[in-house]
Image (cartoon, rainbow, N blue to C red):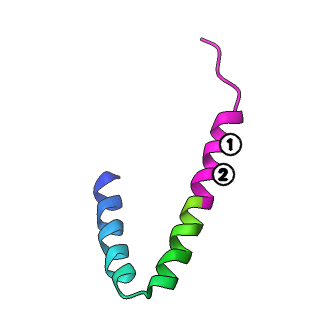
């Protein structure tokens, strides 16, 4: 799984290198929005009882 993620990240880095600054900023904004949504989802999730 980690190896696949590394391969995907490397491929994405080549694509990102070809984008304009404006396009890169748009990508980063979408990533930030996703991370914020995930953070809120995890924060609001009930904690399992042990």
The residue carrying pointer 2 sits among few (fewer than 14), some (14 to 19) or many (20 or more) residues within 10 Å by Cα, namely few
Residue 38: percent from left, percent from top: 62, 48
Q: Of residues 18 and 46, which is closer to you in this image?
A: 18
Asked if marks 2 and 1 touch (Cβ < 8 Å), the reply is yes
Asked if residue 50 lies left or right of residue 9, the reply is right
Residue 13: percent from left, percent from top: 33, 74
Residue 31: percent from left, percent from top: 54, 63
Q: Secondary structure at mark 2?
A: helix
What secondary structure prevails in the magenta region? Answer: helix
Q: Which residue is located at x 66 percent, y 23 percent?
A: 47
Q: Which residue is located at x 34 percent, y 82 percent?
A: 17
Q: Of residues 36 and 46, which is closer to you in this image?
A: 36
Q: Which residue is located at x 64 percent, y 20 percent?
A: 48
State which quadrant residue 33 falls in: bottom right
Decide whether residue 46 is among the magenta residues. Answer: yes
As measured in the structure, the alpha-carbon distance from the residue carrying label 2 to the one carrying label 1 is 6 Å
Q: Secondary structure at mark 1?
A: helix
Asked if residue 20 lies left or right of residue 5, the reply is right
Region of the chain picked out in magenta, as a range: 33-50
* 50 is higher (above) or lower (below) than 35: above
Res 37 label: 2
The residue carrying pointer 1 sits among few (fewer than 14), some (14 to 19) or many (20 or more) residues within 10 Å by Cα, namely few
* 10 is higher (above) or lower (below) than 18: above
Res 25 label: none
For label 1, the residue is 41
């Amino acid at each position: 799984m980690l190896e696949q993620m590394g391969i995907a990240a490397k491929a994405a880095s080549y694509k990102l290198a070809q984008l304009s600054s404006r396009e890169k900023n748009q990508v980063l904004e979408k990533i930030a929005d996703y991370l914020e949504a995930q953070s809120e989802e995890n924060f609001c999730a009930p904690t399992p009882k042990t």
